[in-house]
Amino acid sequence: MAKTENGLRSSDPQNLRGTSESLAERESSSFGSDSEVNGFANTERQTDRYGFIGGAQQHTGHSEQEVPPEVLRQREAKWLDMLNNWDKWMAKRHKKVKLRCQKGIPPSLRGRAWLYLSGGKVKKEQNQRKFQELDSQPGDPKWLDVIEKDLHRQFPFHEMFVARGGHGQQDLFRVLKAYTLYRPEEGYCQAQAPIAAVLLMHMPAEDAFWGLVQICEKYLPGYYSAGLEAIQLDGEILFALLRRVSPAAHKHLKKHKIDPILYMTEWFMCAFSRTLPWASVLRVWDMFFCEGVKIIFRVGLVLLKCMLGTQEKLKACQGQYETMELLRAVDPKYMLEGFLIREILELPVSERDIEKEHHVQLKRWKETHGDLHYKSPPRMHGARAIITAEPHTRQDLRQNPTIVVEPPPPNAPPAKDEKKKDKGRRGSLKKAPGSKKEVANPYPIPSVPPSLPADAPLQPEPESSQQDNQSLSSTELDTYL
């Protein structure tokens, strides 16, 4: 892939596999260099709502849509009900789940929702202690060195990853190392790092690991394997679909012999996490986990159509170089949350269209390249396909809080001489009639709160409660309590 501003740089997709040659080339990149990272670590900068120091990538004042607090509270109540009855909702009301993902998952529940949608929750419960087992192993040295070199390049201006050796980079290393042990035949690919980093922004390391497993095995199978044949095949599928969506853009790219692998590799392999404004990234991922890879195809088609879809726009890029420069710097107005999501939802590209074109391109591939060297498992188009294909029990979907407060043990019975002393004290402290007060138990036994109606707004917390909650991280508080 041609040189890009945000990281994955090479005309040969093999270099995305994390080879030492590509890493040596990227050491000269200014993006995420030591000086910048240390500069941000030592300089006081304002952190935005997403955790980015100085503002998220591609951020503008109009790049995100504000959701009123009362609407957000209602959505949280609805999502809590869905997560508590996930089996029933996926089996009988999947269209409603899909609609709510399109509207955007509430930030406080996004990590938990992604884990349920991807099937990572079931995978985790059915493989208990597996991550801890992998985490305790030393790992393959040939991958560890490459992973360590990549850590500081992943969202270096996010508060989780800004410090070298900080908890964010440590967890990222653990997740990526665990995957190389879980799938030693695949090893590590550089494009997996931003995927794992986004997951870690919303969930603990173990959950992020199983989320990464599901993305690599169910949503984007073969993308990160040696040879990157799957991503090249999907590039041809994207190009074929573009002929129907935007004939002008298709004709222009074909005329200048611009292969899809030159502009779509980072888009697809990183699921647009390094391309779009952050508000748009989260909305795209909400739909991606629910509906599958067709969302990634739609985003790519929308950007190509908007940038190259008319003759007037094509006047600005008369050759291959000008076209590639245009695609490397997509106009921000086409990536705004409101505009982009509306275009994605209106684009008539279904999983059936993708599968049909996949068979056509696979046949052509075999005619020109022979059989695929790496036969990846079949792709699952979204949450419903995954939950249908993988048997599970209700116990697998049960929500297990990570913080459990046990009530204090009952006091041991006092000795006989202590009883006499207490009796004497109680006799001397007689209360006046009507002055008896009931003292609240400081350690109440946890009870299940009553379920709320679907549309009932949640009551705001008292000020003291809100102040106490602010001392916890948003992940611990909102997602797992």
Image: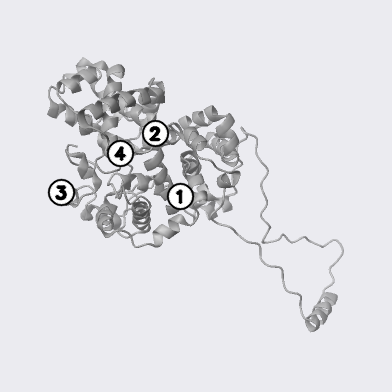
Q: Circle 2 sits on which residue?
A: 284
Q: Nearer the viewer, residue 195 or 12?
A: 12
Q: Amino acid at mark 1?
A: Asp
Q: Position of residue 381 (x, y in %)?
A: 43, 31
Q: Residues within 10 Å of mark 4 (few under 14, many from 20)?
A: many
Q: CA distance from mark 3 to mark 2?
A: 31 Å
Say if mark 2 contacts mark 1, CB within 8 Å.
no
Q: Nearer the viewer, residue 65 or 410?
A: 410
Say if mark 3 contacts mark 1, CB within 8 Å.
no
Frontmost of labels 2 and 1 is 1
Q: Amino acid at mark 3?
A: Glu
Q: Earlier in the sequence, mark 2 or mark 1?
A: 1
Kindly identify which numbered label has been placed on residue 25. Answer: 3
Q: CA distance from mark 2 to mark 4?
A: 14 Å
- Could you tell me which secondary element the residue under label 4 belongs to? helix
Q: CA distance from mark 1 to mark 4?
A: 20 Å
Q: CA distance from mark 3 to mark 1?
A: 33 Å
